[in-house]
Amino acid sequence: MRIIVKAKTKSKVEKVERVGQPSLDLESNKVELATYKVSVKEAPVAGKANEAIVKALAVYFNIAPARIKLITGQASKQKIFEIL
């Protein structure tokens, strides 16, 4: 399953919220992806915020962090993650 994550770094409170399900055109196929807003305390420096987002998603979905992979958006606020 792939999800869109809107990242909020340097937040006072860490949380994960489902905010919608927009569609994207990937390889000429319309794909529906769930959108989540993830707030983390870490700053976007040296990948620390991405690591914190993975940990927050792992807690939210009750799975191991190793099952979550960042697909796109390494340096962007909007990211796509794959949940294995």
Image: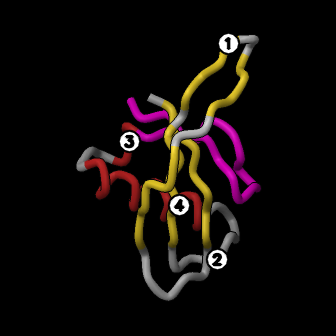
Q: Earlier in the sequence, mark 3 or mark 2?
A: 2
Q: Secondary structure at mark 3?
A: helix
Task: Read off the residue under disc 1.
Answer: 29
The three-letter code of the residue at mark 3 reads Ala
Q: Position of residue 60 (x, y in %)?
A: 31, 56
Which residue corresponds to the image point at 61% horizontal and 57% vertical from the top-left?
A: 6
Which residue corresponds to the image point at 60% horizontal and 38% vertical from the top-left?
A: 22
Residue bounds of the magenta highlight: 68-84
- Inter-mark Cα distance, 3 to 1: 28 Å
**Compared with residue 36, is residue 25 higher up or lower down, i.e. above or below?**
above
Which residue corresponds to the image point at 64% horizontal and 77% vertical from the top-left?
A: 43
Q: Position of residue 32 (x, y in %)?
A: 55, 28
**Compared with residue 5, is residue 28 higher up or lower down, i.e. above or below?**
above
Q: Residues within 10 Å of mark 4 (few under 14, many from 20)?
A: some
Q: Earlier in the sequence, mark 3 or mark 1?
A: 1
Q: Secondary structure at mark 1?
A: strand
Using the image as rendered, state which of residue 81 and residue 64 is in the foreground: 81
Mark number displayed over residue 37: 4
**Compared with residue 39, is residue 31 higher up or lower down, i.e. above or below?**
above
Using the image as rendered, state which of residue 43 and residue 79 is in the foreground: 79
Q: Are marks 3 and 2 in contact (CB under 8 Å)?
A: no
Mark number displayed over residue 43: 2
Callout in the foreground (1, 2): 1
Rendered image coloring scheme: secondary structure
- Inter-mark Cα distance, 2 to 4: 16 Å
Task: Read off the residue under disc 3.
Answer: 66
Is residue 53 within the magenta segment? no
